[in-house]
Image (spheres, helix red, strand yellow):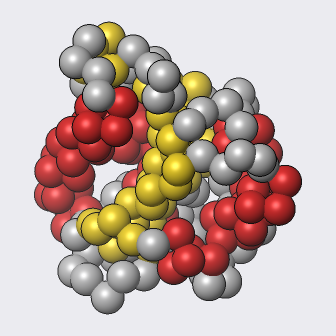
Amino acid sequence: MVKLNILCFGNILHGDDGIGAEIARRLLDCELPENVEVFDVGTQGLNALPLFSQCSHLLIVDAAELGLSPGEWQFIEPSQMLSESNADHAGGVGYLLKAAQAVTHPMPILTVLGVQKGNIAAFSPHLSNSVMAKLHECIEQIVTLSRDLTGNTHHSTAQIWGRGKA
């Protein structure tokens, strides 16, 4: 059976970098397949490593530099995250992916959804208007992807695991 973990990264005190927390919160209002779990992992970095071995598929959601307009999103190759030098997430998502490749066997099938960040400023706990304006379509795509990946039409209310539970 397919088991999907959705890991949402971001620092809620750094403007648009907090996109992962907002996406995780909004997924609570969505009907996701029963075998999908959502994790707001914040800036936990390597502490999220055990979540790689508890599923067959993994979706990582994070703010990224994609060369798009703020709030636009796209599925990207995990290798694009490997090159990120951002260390806001206790080593960064790229560092986490390298560690997971080294120690997680078998690796889950990995999908990465990057959201173009706009305003990143320390101690700015709000997403920009341009990111908020595109959030709904991003959430819809995540719900669709979760249903497609799991092949599951049975839905349940999403449960979110908070920052301290990864």
Q: Is residue 141 left or right of residue 79?
A: left
Residue 16's x, y, as percent? Answer: 40, 64
Looking at the picture, does residue 101 appear above or below residue 84? above
Q: Quadrant of residue 139?
A: top left
The front one of 152 and 64 is 152
Residue 92's x, y, as percent? Answer: 69, 68
Most extreme residue toward the bottom, as rendered?
67
Q: Is residue 112 left or right of residue 91?
A: left
Which residue is located at x 68 percent, y 63 percent? 97
Which residue is located at x 22 percent, y 80 percent? 69
Which residue is located at x 45 percent, y 56 percent? 111
Looking at the picture, does residue 87 appear above or below residue 142? below
Most extreme residue toward the right, as rendered?
103
Q: Is residue 44 left or right of residue 16?
A: right
Residue 57's x, y, as percent? Answer: 51, 41
Looking at the picture, does residue 85 appear above or below residue 103? below
The front one of 118 and 75 is 75
Number of numbered discs on residues: 0
Looking at the picture, does residue 158 appear above or below residue 144? above
Q: Quadrant of residue 99?
A: bottom right
Which residue is located at x 32 percent, y 11 percent? 156
- Can residue 90 be seen in the rendering of this structure? no
Residue 94's x, y, as percent? Answer: 66, 71
Image quarter (top left, top right, bottom left or bottom right) of the C terminus: top right
- Can residue 41 be seen in the rendering of this structure? yes
